[in-house]
Amino acid sequence: MKNKNVLIILVIGALLLLCIYCIATGLLGSFSDGFQEGVSESNTKTDNSQVSITPTDSEVAEPEVNNDSKDQEETSALEMMEVAFEGGYSQSEIKEKLDEAMTLYALEINEENYSKAGSALIALRKESKTGVTEMDILDFMIEMYAEDVNMSFPDAAGLAAGMLE
């Protein structure tokens, strides 16, 4: 019981420190801007081993919700994450980890939440001073999950990123 209380106190303390850090650095701004910047930043790299395609404004602005009637002009959040995430992960690899983390932290799995989660992860990666990637954060979120601790997806992502730093 004592270890559980210590863990809860440590988690609350870490969250408070993370909130102060986020406020000081402006990280609590619009995560959607970070996601679109992440897509743009990934597409402008000069790595000759990757082919990059810059999405148009219409592709970035409205993610496709109904995959049954998907137009070729629209790009899903998972497709954008595949481009923006560091490490060259496939959509299926990203979806598997993201679905697991979203389920653990009680975030409904839908297109809008994929977009928000991707934006948050990209913003946290961009703030990293040690090269922490989006998938590193997801892996640590899954690893650190504690059933007795009620934490939201954004809080868990921020805490994981801070602890990995």
Image: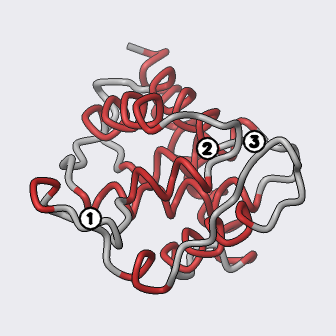
Q: Where is 131 relative to 139, above or below? A: below
- Tell me the tag on residue 132: 3
Mark pair 1, 2: CA separation = 18 Å
Classify 10 Å Cα crowding around label 2: few (below 14), some (14-19), many (20 and above).
many
Residue of label 1: 112
Classify 10 Å Cα crowding around label 1: few (below 14), some (14-19), many (20 and above).
some
Which numbered disc flags the more N-terminal residue, 1 or 2?
A: 1
Residue 136 location, quadrant: top right
- Taking the spot 40% from the left edge, 84% from the top edge, the residue there is 58
- Taking the spot 35% from the left edge, 44% from the top edge, the residue there is 151
- Taking the spot 61% from the left edge, 58% from the top edge, the residue there is 122
Q: Nearer the viewer, residue 10 or 74?
A: 74
Mark pair 1, 3: CA separation = 24 Å
Q: Quadrant of the C terminus?
A: top right
Q: Nearer the viewer, residue 116 or 85?
A: 85
Residue of label 2: 134
Mark pair 3, 2: CA separation = 7 Å
> Where's residue 33, x and y in %?
56, 80
Residue lying at the far bottom of the rendered structure: 57
Q: Where is 121 relative to 141, above or below? A: below
- Taking the spot 31% from the left edge, 69% from the top edge, the residue there is 63
Give the left or right position of residue 38, taking residue 140 as reference: right
Which numbered disc flags the more N-terminal residue, 1 or 3?
A: 1
